[in-house]
Amino acid sequence: MSTEVYPSCCHDSDLAVDDRRLGEAHQDAAHTCELSYDSRSNDSRYPAADLHLELRPGKGEIACSPVGCVEVACGDVALRITRDTDITQLALKVDGGKNVLIRAEPSGETKSIVSEPSNAFPATGAGFDFIVVGSSFCGLAFAETLRRHNPKANILILERGDVDLDQHHQILPPRGDGKTASKMASRPWSVSHHGQFINNIHGQILYFGGRSTYWSGWCPEPSEAELVGWPEALKQRLRPYFPRAREWLGVIPASAVKEDDCLYGPLQGFLQETCRSALAAEGSVTRISPAPLAMGNKRNEKFSTPTPLIRMGRSNIQTILNCTVLKIIHDGKRATHLQTSQGMLPLNEAKLILAMSTLPSTTLVLNSFSKDQFPSLANVGKRFTAHSVSSAIARVPRNGLPVPPSGHGVQLGAVYIAGKGQAQYHLQVSAAATSNPESKDLELCRQFSANSIPQACINGSPKHVLVSCSALGELDHKNEDNWFRLKEKGTQSDLTSNGELQIVPNDQDMALWSTMDEVMFKTIEGCLSSPDDKVEYWHENKEEWMTERPTTESIRQKNAVHDASTMWIGEDGDEEAPVGLDYRLRGVENVYITGGALWPTGGSWNPVLTIVAMAMHLADSLCSVDVNKIDG
């Protein structure tokens, strides 16, 4: 593969920058160009790459090592990439701190994203058919589905964040800046009550692609029984969309994930069998299956949205980064403008799609539509659900288990267990065994494992089987002590951070938490049962392995996950629900909601498959597709 790309001067904001425009762009003579490049040359599965910086005019050629950084001060700068593999990533910094991500495809086609675009904000909204706020799962699913029916639709995507990663973080080498999902998460709201166990929720990832670049990849499909409290009409309409969402996300069972036959193989079979055996007498368990993972692509990489957004970018799709929507301006019936951090944007005839995460979209609606003027929205934020989480990591020497001995490379396994006690819960069980943690095994384990396992655990366990287990349980949607609302006027002027969250688990929530904690330990100890050795648990606070179970306080996560239900969807005659079956905000003609905010009840399953199915259904509905004829 060989292609030439030129650094953009950041005058263009849309996702697709064709070769002609790239060729015309150049950098002013005195500016410094900083290039960092990852070739994955440390992984023997990928050939080494040649990377050259060519200085023009007539200043020779500088060759860089496959992994390295070079600074160049020159006039026109061209990058020449020669590579045999189909992934090439470049992160380029130009004068003024503006970032450009460039991906070179095998065909030689070049796509780029430019952040902090100058003069890019449209003076009017004329010509846009749809304006989508958010670039994560729902934004991409909606845009792609819409474009399939209407390729000429003009779509504007507004993204609050900047460019950080262009694919899932597990696929990339470890970050040198020490940033992790927890460190990058933003929580632009306050919390009114700090309880013993739940203090907050996992925050937003304020970058292009959002949470899709930092997620587990687990994508279970909810059963009919698990969709308790959901409108019957909606459940029937969504059924044919679950297979479409699975295909779109690349969801496959863990048993189908293969990489040189050393990943989800013998250990996967062992884990499935022992989970079933350990929980045979557990009455609360409803199903056990290989983990459904969004890894069904040619490299078994977890799905993320930046690369598909880059690839689908054309002249009629425009994306603006670093653009925060502060308020929706309306005339009492329909949204007319968006007040944003880059100025006022008229909507004209465009439909507005809120594809943000739950609390930011709820904050925007609460700031924009008063309950006095829109009484049908009086319940926005009065319902709040999320998932409580417990996690534990354990190990046992592998020679006491019926799994292949050391020397057989990396072996992984992942099993999904659903249950119902006082309410719904599920377990995500992930196993790993490495023969040499100092070799490429550690990198393979980091890239392909279903649950994240700390490096310290893997490094100290070359002759062990490790099991990481997370238990997630639904919070009671009827609990009136859980809510999200605006702070009192005058206490916060920033329209993006004037929300207030309260989470107070009730007796049902705490009883369920105890139930799923016990099932989690029963699962771990059943899977790792050995006649010769005791199960050891990782005690993170002491950073050592011990045979005692970790304490309840240490396994229960302080942040809940999968926040939902603040703008739940209801039957057409349900006056309590803020959103109707058409996904439209009641009383507003042209504003539509996607994501977890729509969920009538929280269930316990991971939400991505369901929110993608709902976003696809919305796009079809707005294109007047007969959804009853969609084949599942």
Image (cartoon, rainbow, N blue to C red):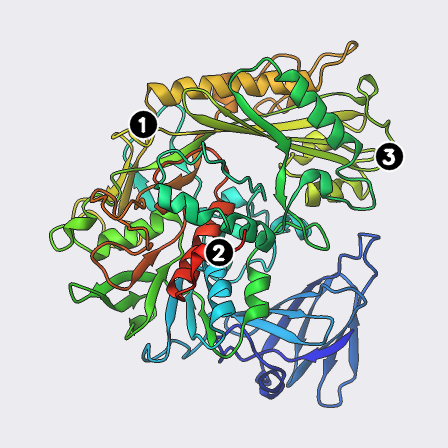
Residue 367 in sight: yes
Residue at 36%, 61% (x, y): give it.
353
Dot 2 surroundings within 10 Å: few (below 14), some, or many (20 or more)? Answer: many
Q: Looking at the picture, does residue 221 appear above or below residue 372?
A: above
Circle nearer the N terminus (1, 2)? 2
Circle nearer the N terminus (3, 1)? 3
Q: Is residue 136 left or right of residue 467?
A: left
Kind of element beneath mark 3: loop
In the rendered structure, which amino acid carries the disc numbered 3?
Answer: His
- Spot occupied by residue 412 in the image (x, y as percentages of width and height): 73, 35
Residues tagged 3 and 2 counted as in contact (Cβ below 8 A): no
- Residue 504, quarter of the rendered image: top left
Q: Which mark is residue 451?
A: none
- Spot occupied by residue 277 in the image (x, y as percentages of width and height): 67, 17
Residue at 67%, 53% (x, y): give it.
172
Label 1, label 2: how far apart the Cα atoms are: 29 Å
Label 3, label 1: how far apart the Cα atoms are: 48 Å
Q: Which mark is residue 504?
A: 1
In the rendered structure, which amino acid carries the disc numbered 2?
Answer: Ser
Residues tagged 1 and 2 counted as in contact (Cβ below 8 A): no
Asked whether 489 or 232 is in front, the reply is: 232
Q: Which mark is residue 136?
A: 2
Q: Looking at the picture, does residue 551 appear above or below residue 50?
A: above
The residue lying furthest to the front in this view is: 629
Circle nearer the N terminus (3, 2)? 2
In the rendered structure, which amino acid carries the disc numbered 1?
Answer: Val
Kind of element beneath mark 1: loop
Q: Is residue 518 left or right of residue 460?
A: left
Q: Looking at the picture, does residue 550 appear above or below residue 134?
A: above
Residue behind mark 3: 408
Kind of element beneath mark 2: loop
Asked whether 200 or 519 is in front, the reply is: 519
